């Protein structure tokens, strides 16, 4: 069966149909696409899309929904079918979008400067004075920043007659460009033939220009650029991390930055490093608790002052949120004539600002046909757009009362009957209303429009509201040019001398913190997985002695919430239940599932520093042991083996694909410390008096420590406690031995940017004393000094057991703690 | 009248503060008939960086950072201010209040806009109908602006009780209005809310008060700490100041430090600190002396 886009059920002719003018033939710019799509069997399409959706999931492409049942990390939803827009038509849209951008910039320059638009009666003063986004500390001082706007977003909708209208605009920290880029990667990957035969404009050039434009904002060469995010709980955090990685700039949170002597610095593990340009995704009023909202924990104290001094550039500049109000829309035609001596080319949807008496009267009279929205969303964060036609009479009376008591705070808009395009959903095709979010960037010497954008699709069939926050999904937008355009994949720069670099940008302390814990959790997951696999594969067929040994092996989990009986020998059923609980119980922080969740969390916090492959592995890991309720017993060990494979793949990438920079250093420190913790536990079990019937424990521990093969090669099948001790403790060639961990830790400590001399020495000294133990003497009970050697062994293992946590604490205190203290506001 | 002002602020922290960024609004403005002859700010421990800025409202700010660990921050502002009797003299405020109020929103002159911007809600002063109702008891139809303003001030003085324990820096004008108790800052906020609720521009003025008049009159409240009062805009007469805490029209006895939309715009010493523990104590001492 082939997919026939033209056999759609709904062709009502009331709204604009993006695909077809007459319901029979596709519009010319869709033709090549539709033809190629129809060559493809539906099953093939379904397969490809299933792969794409898996990739979205594994890449961790998410959009956090506030207050939704799924809560944080809702998977991003995008559609296989892009929206196609004719290149010629796009050309005129572009001109219109650029006009808006120039206009917004000029309005901002004026409102934060001479305010001639107010004295000249071109804009009502209430839109400034009643607007909480008017940042008074910035007013009169914009000279320090050469322009306000770096990137703006405009939401477009197409009415039944085919005209595009501007419905809304975002001027302070617009989101969506990163999702547009990710959508492109996904869709172009799923439909490569269609992509190349349709002559689609590429997006990458826009982002290269953006990187350059940001660098140009700085006062000095080799500018340090960061992306300031509110943090992992923000709805579009995925995009922040994605863009930071794509643009090659450092992702930071407010607590990563500090202002000293009117300059902005990033807290790195090597000390403070100056920051020149901040691409911000934190809203205006949250950027500086000292001079803006004192209750903000997202900003940087002193940022306003550093910006006013010209020592840091923000994109967009502080204060840009002022004209995000829909209240300016009705005034744009006059403003455009006044400021640009041009007519507005792209109309905005009919909007009435209720601060004007006549307009408010009209709005109240025609409420049924209008949507009422807050003029200043920052003040009324809870208000949802109110559709006049859907209001009950009491709601209506309440709204009218509000309009009269707080007229400045409301706008009313005509709602556009959205154009529709086909949506592909698991083989079914239906049509949905859509809006296009377009992006315009200030390159410093002009404005550039992203040739594409983020299409948002209404959730309901007759829905006129598109909102990702409210469950809608997205589409890629393809600008179809009549001829194919050649664009270089990597810029070949010939006019600039290149300085060769061997290290990446400095590592923020917060990132080091997360990488350290990623190392620890990954290693913890591996040890728990191995312990579980060894235990679960034996527990059902174990004899009494083996069960006894499994109970001792259980101690290596170090759990304090065991389900086992406190006294007596646990039976097989109790042990099995305990192991299963240690595998999957999310209420136990030491369970494998909990540790894998932590891997995902800390990995997510540094996703911009990991390769896409590593991020995908982390995504797979967090679901590697998800079990059905009635799972066959044998499947559990298979799942654990699968989990081990993923963990090994991760270690492989860590070893072979990560450059040995500071980030790798902290990841490795975490890993070595954690493995040393576990190895000490294993060794302490061996050290405890072993009866002959305890010997299965040796075999189990060799398996857990992945050293069975080596042991067999050396000693065949005879098990000796001393030989196992030697292999797991002293053999420096065994990557699982304690010696290996400690000597690597000592090396890593020497590479730290600021050496922790005491800890480095303590590790080296413990290592030296451990090596001086003569295991041969312990072996033969008759030899004199056996007991003394045994006591020394106990002592040194105890010492290392206590040394390791203190090393971890000292690393935290030295490198990470200053990003963990929250600033306190006083006197305000 | 010439005054020597000393305004000392001491923050004591539970545990050392490793770093702090601060903004002080402690240097008196210079205005016609109100000359700040000199002023200085002593900061201990010595800041690693300090500079001055004139803010949006024309106030003098000092921004400074302290990078040395410290358990105590001492800031002493000293100044000499010459206030003459012409200062704050009311112009002709006899026109009806509605008439003057109606002219403000449509006045797009620079000075008209400067006044109009104070007619709106601000972060600490949200408006509602109960403030408007209270104000209209004084601002009755056709009443001269000045008379209505003095009446509102007198009513507030009568109905609100000065009580240093009833409120704190976070108490909203709404709460004060219900409690009918508070300090000068609270009364200023409530009166501003009343005035703005009926469309009049009103601003918050901070400064100092001579505690008894030269003629040996009654002791006034608000002398040992910084004081706050209200200015409202009357189209013909300019800014008219009233002190709802003492039911007087400020004159030579009031020294102006700064003004803004509400306390938040001009808090005397604020900061963002790292460390310091959960609690800190604050000590403020103000001395206003006629200069020899």
Image: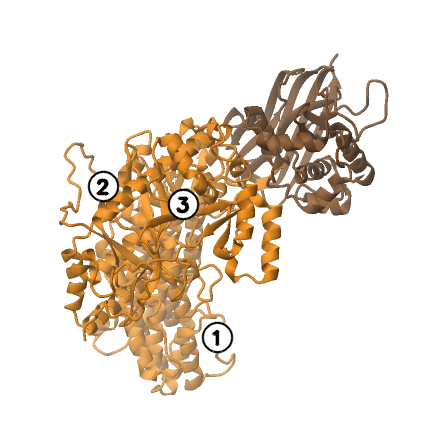
Chain colours: A orange, B brown
State the SS at label 3: strand
Q: Write down the chain letter for disc 2.
A: A
Judged left or right of residue A282, residue A445 is: left
Mark 3 / mark 1, whichever is N-terminal: 3
- For disc 2, the neighbor class at 10 Å (few under 14, some 14 to 19, many from 20) is few
Looking at the rendered structure, which numbered label has been put on residue B272? none
Mark 2 vs mark 3: give the one in front. Answer: 3
Q: Nearer the viewer, residue B275 or A215?
A: A215
Q: Nearer the viewer, residue A398 or A635?
A: A398
Q: Nearer the viewer, residue A379 or A331?
A: A331
Quickly name the residue at label 1: A562
Judged left or right of residue A745, residue B218 is: right
Q: Position of residue A824 (x, y in %)?
A: 56, 43
Residue at the spot x=75%, y=31% of the render? B149
Mark 2 / mark 3, whichever is N-terminal: 3
Q: Position of residue A417 (x, y in %)?
A: 39, 58
Q: Write down the chain letter for disc 1.
A: A
Quote the CA–CA distance across marks 2 and 3: 39 Å
Answer whether labels 3 and 1 touch (C-beta < 8 Å).
no
Q: Write down the chain letter for disc 3.
A: A
State the SS at label 2: loop
Rendered position, A559 above or below A125 = below
In which quadrant of the rendered image does the C terminus of chain A lie? top right
Q: Nearer the viewer, residue A47 or A385?
A: A385
- For disc 1, the neighbor class at 10 Å (few under 14, some 14 to 19, many from 20) is some
Q: Position of residue B81 (x, y in %)?
A: 67, 17
Whether residue A698 is visible here, answered yes or no, is: no
Quickly name the residue at label 3: A170
Looking at the rendered structure, which numbered label has been put on residue A502? 2
Residue at the spot x=59%, y=52% of the render? A400
Quote the CA–CA distance across marks 3 and 1: 53 Å
């Amino acid at each position: 069966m082939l997919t026939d886009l033209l056999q759609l059920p709904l062709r009502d002719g009331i709204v604009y149909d993006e695909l077809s003018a007459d319901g029979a033939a596709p519009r010319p710019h869709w033709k090549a696409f539709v033809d190629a799509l129809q060559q493809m069997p539906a099953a093939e399409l379904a397969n490809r899309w299933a792969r794409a959706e898996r990739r979205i999931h594994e890449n961790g492409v998410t959009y956090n929904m506030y207050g939704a049942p799924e809560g944080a990390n809702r998977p991003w939803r995008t559609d296989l079918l892009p929206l196609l827009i004719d290149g010629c038509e796009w050309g005129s849209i572009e001109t219109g979008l650029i006009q808006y951008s120039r206009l917004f910039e000029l309005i901002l320059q004026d409102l934060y400067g001479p305010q001639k638009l107010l004295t000249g009666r071109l804009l009502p003063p209430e839109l400034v004075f009643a607007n909480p986004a008017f940042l008074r500390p910035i007013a009169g001082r914009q000279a320090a920043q050469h322009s306000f706007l770096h990137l703006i977003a405009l939401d477009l909708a197409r009415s039944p007659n085919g005209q595009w209208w501007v419905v809304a605009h975002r001027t302070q920290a617009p989101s969506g460009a990163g999702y547009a880029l990710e959508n492109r990667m996904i869709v172009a990957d799923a439909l490569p033939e269609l992509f190349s035969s349709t002559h689609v404009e590429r997006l990458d050039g826009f982002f290269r220009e953006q990187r350059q434009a940001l660098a140009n904002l700085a006062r000095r060469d080799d500018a340090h650029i960061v992306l300031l995010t509110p943090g992992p709980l923000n709805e579009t955090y995925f995009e922040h991390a994605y863009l930071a990685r794509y643009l090659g700039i450092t992702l930071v949170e407010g607590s990563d930055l500090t202002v000293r002597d009117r300059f902005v610095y990033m807290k790195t593990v090597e000390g403070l490093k100056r920051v020149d340009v901040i691409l911000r995704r934190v809203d205006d009023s949250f950027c500086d608790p000292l001079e803006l909202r004192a209750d903000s924990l997202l900003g940087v104290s002193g940022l306003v002052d550093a910006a006013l001094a010209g020592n840091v550039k923000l994109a967009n500049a502080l204060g840009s949120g002022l004209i995000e109000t829909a209240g300016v829309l009705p005034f744009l035609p006059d403003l455009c004539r006044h400021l640009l001596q041009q007519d507005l080319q792209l109309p905005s949807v009919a909007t009435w600002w209720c601060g004007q008496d006549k307009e408010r009267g009209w709005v109240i009279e025609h409420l049924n046909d209008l949507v009422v929205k807050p003029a200043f969303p920052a003040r009324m964060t809870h208000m949802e757009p109110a559709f006049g036609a859907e209001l009950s009479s009491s709601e209506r009376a309440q709204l009218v009362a509000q309009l009269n008591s707080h007229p400045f705070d409301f706008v009313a808009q005509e709602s556009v009957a959205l154009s529709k395009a086909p949506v592909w959903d698991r083989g079914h095709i239906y049509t949905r209303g859509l809006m296009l979010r377009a992006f315009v960037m200030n390159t410093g010497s002009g404005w550039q429009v992203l040739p594409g954008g983020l299409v948002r699709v209404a959730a309901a069939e007759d829905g006129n509201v598109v909102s990702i926050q409210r469950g809608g999904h997205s589409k890629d937008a393809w600008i179809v040019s009549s001829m194919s355009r050649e664009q270089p994949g990597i810029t070949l720069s010939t006019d600039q001398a290149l300085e060769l670099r061997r290290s990446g940008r400095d590592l923020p302390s917060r990132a080091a913190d997360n990488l350290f814990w990623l190392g620890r959790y990954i290693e913890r997951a591996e040890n728990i997985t191995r312990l579980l696999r060894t235990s679960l594969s034996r527990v059902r067929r174990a004899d009494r002695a083996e069960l006894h040994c499994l109970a001792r092996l259980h101690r290596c989990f170090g759990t304090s919430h065991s389900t086992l009986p406190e006294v007596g020998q646990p039976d097989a059923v109790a042990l099995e239940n305990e192991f299963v609980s240690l595998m999957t119980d999310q209420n136990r922080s030491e369970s494998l599932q909990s540790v894998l969740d932590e891997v995902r969390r800390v990995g997510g916090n540094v996703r911009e520093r990991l390769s896409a492959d590593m991020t995908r592995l982390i995504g797979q890991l967090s679901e590697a042991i998800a079990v059905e309720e009635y799972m066959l017993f044998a499947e559990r060990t298979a799942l654990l083996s699968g989990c081990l494979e993923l963990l090994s793949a991760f270690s492989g990438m860590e070893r072979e694909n990560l450059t040995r920079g500071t980030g790798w250093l902290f990841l490795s420190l975490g890993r070595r410390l954690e493995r040393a913790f576990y190895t000490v536990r294993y060794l302490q079990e061996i050290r405890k008096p072993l009866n002959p019937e305890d010997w299965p424990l040796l075999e189990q521990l060799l398996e857990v420590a992945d050293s069975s093969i080596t042991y067999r090669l050396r000693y065949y099948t005879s098990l000796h406690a001393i030989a196992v001790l030697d292999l797991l403790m002293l053999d420096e060639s065994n990557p699982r031995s304690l010696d290996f961990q400690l000597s690597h830790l000592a090396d890593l400590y020497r590479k730290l940017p600021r050496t922790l001399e005491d800890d480095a020495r303590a590790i080296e000294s413990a290592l030296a004393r451990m090596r001086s133990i003569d295991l041969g003497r312990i072996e033969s009970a008759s030899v004199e000094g056996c007991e003394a050697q045994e006591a020394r062994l106990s002592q040194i293992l105890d010492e290392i057991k206590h040394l390791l946590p203190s090393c971890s604490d000292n690393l935290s205190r030295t490198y990470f703690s200053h990003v963990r203290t929250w600033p306190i506001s006083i006197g305000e | 009248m010439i005054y020597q002002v000393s305004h000392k602020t001491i923050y004591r922290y539970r545990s050392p503060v490793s770093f702090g960024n601060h903004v002080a609004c402690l240097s008196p403005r210079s205005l016609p008939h109100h000359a700040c002859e000199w002023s200085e700010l002593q900061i201990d421990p010595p800041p690693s960086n300090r500079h001055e800025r004139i803010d949006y409202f024309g106030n003098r700010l000092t921004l400074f950072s302290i990078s040395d660990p410290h358990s105590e921050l001492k800031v002493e502002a000293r100044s000499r201010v010459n206030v003459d009797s012409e200062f704050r003299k009311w112009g002709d405020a006899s026109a009806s209040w509605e008439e003057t109020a109606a002219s403000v929103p449509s006045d797009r002159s620079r000075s008209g806009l400067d006044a109009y911007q104070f007619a709106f809600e601000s972060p600490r002063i949200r408006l509602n109908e109960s403030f408007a109702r209270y104000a209209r008891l004084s601002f009755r139809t056709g009443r001269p602006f000045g008379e209505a303003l003095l009446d509102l001030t007198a009513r507030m003085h009568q109905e609100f009780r000065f009580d240093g324990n009833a409120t704190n820096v976070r108490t909203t004008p709404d709460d004060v209005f219900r409690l009918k108790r508070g300090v000068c800052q609270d009364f200023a906020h409530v009166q501003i809310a009343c005035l703005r609720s009926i469309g009049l521009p009103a601003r918050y003025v901070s400064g100092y008060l001579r505690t008894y008049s030269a003629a040996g009159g009654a002791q006034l409240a608000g002398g040992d700490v910084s004081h706050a009062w209200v200015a409202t805009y009357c189209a013909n007469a300019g800014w008219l100041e009233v002190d709802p805490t003492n039911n007087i029209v400020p004159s030579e006895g009031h020294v102006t430090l700064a003004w803004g939309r509400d306390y938040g715009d001009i808090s005397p010493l604020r900061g963002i600190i790292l460390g310091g523990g959960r609690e800190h104590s604050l000590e403020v001492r103000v001395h206003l002396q006629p200069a020899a």
